[in-house]
Image (cartoon, rainbow, N blue to C red):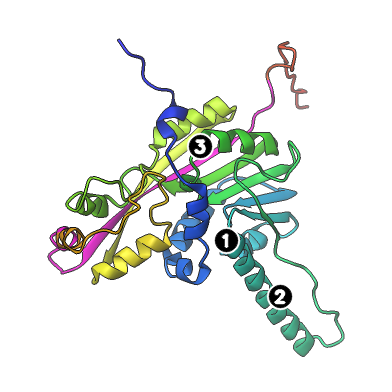
Amino acid sequence: MSQPSPPAERASAPIDLRRVRTLFSRPAAVAESGFLRREVAGRMFERLELIKLAPALVVDAGCGEGADLPVLRQRFGDARLLGVDASDAMLLAAHASQHAAQSSVNRLLQRWLPRRAATSGIAAELACADFAQLPLAGQSADLIWSNLALHWHPQPHRVFAEWHRVLRIDGLLMFSCFGPDTFRELRTAWQQADATPHALPFVDMHDFGDMLVDAGFATPVMDMETITVTYADPLKLLEDVKAWGGNPLATRRRALLGRDAYRRMLDALESGRRADGTLPLTFEVVYGHAFRPAPRKTASGESIIHFDRPKR
């Protein structure tokens, strides 16, 4: 009887990282689909409000054009904030956004408080890097935040191992990503056109939980919800899907799709219209958070016993 594959093998996908960077090289186009990212970020912040945390260093892994950075700055005003993304273009957009916001604050201060020096504070530092190779020393971050970015990496188990390395003891990881039911209507429609995959095989929530444990995180909390976005126009639906990252699979179709096949896909998509005439597009959003626990063994394999001083 064959043994089931470990979660790392089940979760690996043939994602072309260069293709991912290309797909995210047009920040203005990506921003068109930002409404979902903002919605998910709001739901993540609601979860974060339940956790007491005073971090010295917060890392936004997959910061994109920096949409979450101002809210993280507002939530953790005294923390050093670092935004990391693999796309130079998105980081340039984040830098421009920060510069514009800072200039607006300076103008207000100069208008209403002319004797006060203009603020020089920047919302966040920015760095271009792979999620699995962060430019940080071990145990240097207190919070890693990642909103709708993890699913674009081909080896999430390596990413979790790197995030575990970077977090301090009792540091918190909080992330969101797409689950397997995402784009199910579009996936079904493309099957009417050809057999080539046109969407990522997103990772199951339970596999993410197993990977977190394997990476050394303590008692990960995973949950999932379904969000449905509706469209009047199938072309707008396809445009938004491309803005969310499109198809970065290394196994994607390289030749142009024929007109007849494309029409079959559109017809299949149109057949899913609801009674109100709208086209639904499903998103399975996976949320996870976990802490880095204190080590139980030394590097030489000796057990570590922690004693808590009794309260008086």
Q: Is residue 175 left or right of residue 35?
A: right
Between discs 3 and 2, the one toward the N terminus:
2
The C terminus - image quarter: top right
Report if the CB atoms under discs 1 and 3 are less than 8 Å apart: no
Report if the CB atoms under discs 3 and 2 are less than 8 Å apart: no
Q: Choose between 16 and 203: the one closer to the eye.
A: 16
Q: Choose between 170 and 57: the one closer to the eye.
A: 57
Q: Quadrant of residue 70?
A: bottom right
Between discs 1 and 3, the one toward the N terminus:
1
Dot label at residue 68: 1
Magenta stretch in the rendered image: 268-295
| Rendered location of residue 9, percent (x, y) | 44, 28
- Residue 95, relative to residue 135: is it above or below? below
278 is within the stretch colored magenta:
yes
> What residue is shown at x 73% (from left), y 85% (from top)?
107
Residue that label 2 marks: 102
Q: Is residue 143 left or right of residue 179?
A: right
Q: Secondary structure at mark 3?
A: loop
Dot label at residue 155: 3
Task: Calculate the distance from the C-alpha at mark 3 to the C-alpha at mark 2.
Answer: 36 Å
Residue type beneath disc 2: Gln
Q: Secondary structure at mark 2?
A: helix
